[in-house]
Amino acid sequence: MEIKEFYQKVAIVTGAGQGIGFEIAKQLATKGAQVVLNDIDSNLSMKAVTKISLEGGTCLGVAGDASNPDIIKKMVATAVDKFSKLDVVVANAGITLFGDFLTYPASSFFEVVKVNLAGTFFLAQAAANQMIQQGSGGSLLFTSSVTGHQAHKNLAAYGMTKAALEMLAKNLVLELSPYKINVNTVAPWSNSYRKNDG
């Protein structure tokens, strides 16, 4: 039997109903991981799980808001209950709400911060505690953005959260490396940001 790169690893991927998150979940599953896939849209989540399963991957869906503490607990519990452990977490869920800084509404600001920052922070916290309990280490990956490094018009709040995620990762390297938990970020580029350049 071919031993795949992520054979018998257990992973959670948030915001994985489509796009980058889906591709990450699919690649993990096809390389041997057992994946818990999350998306806020239950239909997208179900379709994504079906697609991955049809390609021979092992994948379960947990639909819901990835910044909701109850959903975070459910994702970790599902991984442990169904697959006995948790090895990898990809905190990919995030939202982009464009807007002029001078008129940006508080409702949009707090929603972006809740999903992009709080969701990642508390998922990492729950996952790290599980990994520490297991005693076998693990990996956390946060999806940042080019906007965390380069200013883009109408993306002040979003860019701020993405830059903050990178600092969170740096802090967690210090706090979690003694437990053999790796923490990294990735900052994808999208051509959609070009239209917002000033």
Image (tube, rainbow, N blue to C red):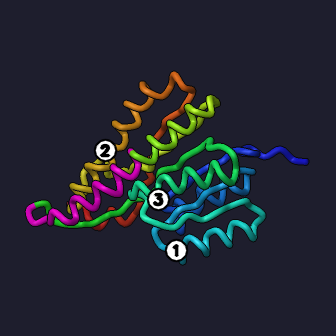
Q: Which residue lies furthest to the right in this view?
A: 1
Q: What element carries label 1?
A: helix
Q: Give the range drawn in magenta.
A: 102-121
Front: mark 2 or 3: 3
Residue identified by numbered label 1: 42
| SS state under label 3 | helix
Q: Percent from the top left, x then y, of residue 35? A: 65, 55
Q: How far apart are marks 2 and 3 (CA)?
A: 25 Å
Amino acid residing under circle 2: Ala
Q: Mark 3 points at which residue?
A: 71
Residue 106 shown in magenta:
yes
The residue under the point 54% across, 68% down is 17
Q: Position of residue 170 (x, y in %)?
A: 39, 32
- Horizontal arrangement in the rendering, residue 12 relative to residue 10 (left or right): left
- 49 sits left or right of 14 in the view: right
Amino acid identity at mark 1? Ser
Residue positioned 62% across, 49% down in the render: 11
Label located before the other in sequence (1 or 2): 1
Q: Residue at 55% across / 31% down in the picture? A: 132
10 Å crowding of disc 1: few (<14), some (14-19), many (20+): some
Dominant secondary structure, magenta: helix
Characterize the local packing of mark 2: few (<14), some (14-19) or many (20 or more) Cα atoms within 10 angstroms. some
| Residue that carries the numbered disc 2 in the rendered image | 163
Quarter occupied by residue 172: top left
Tell which tag, 1 or 2, sits nearer the viewer.
1
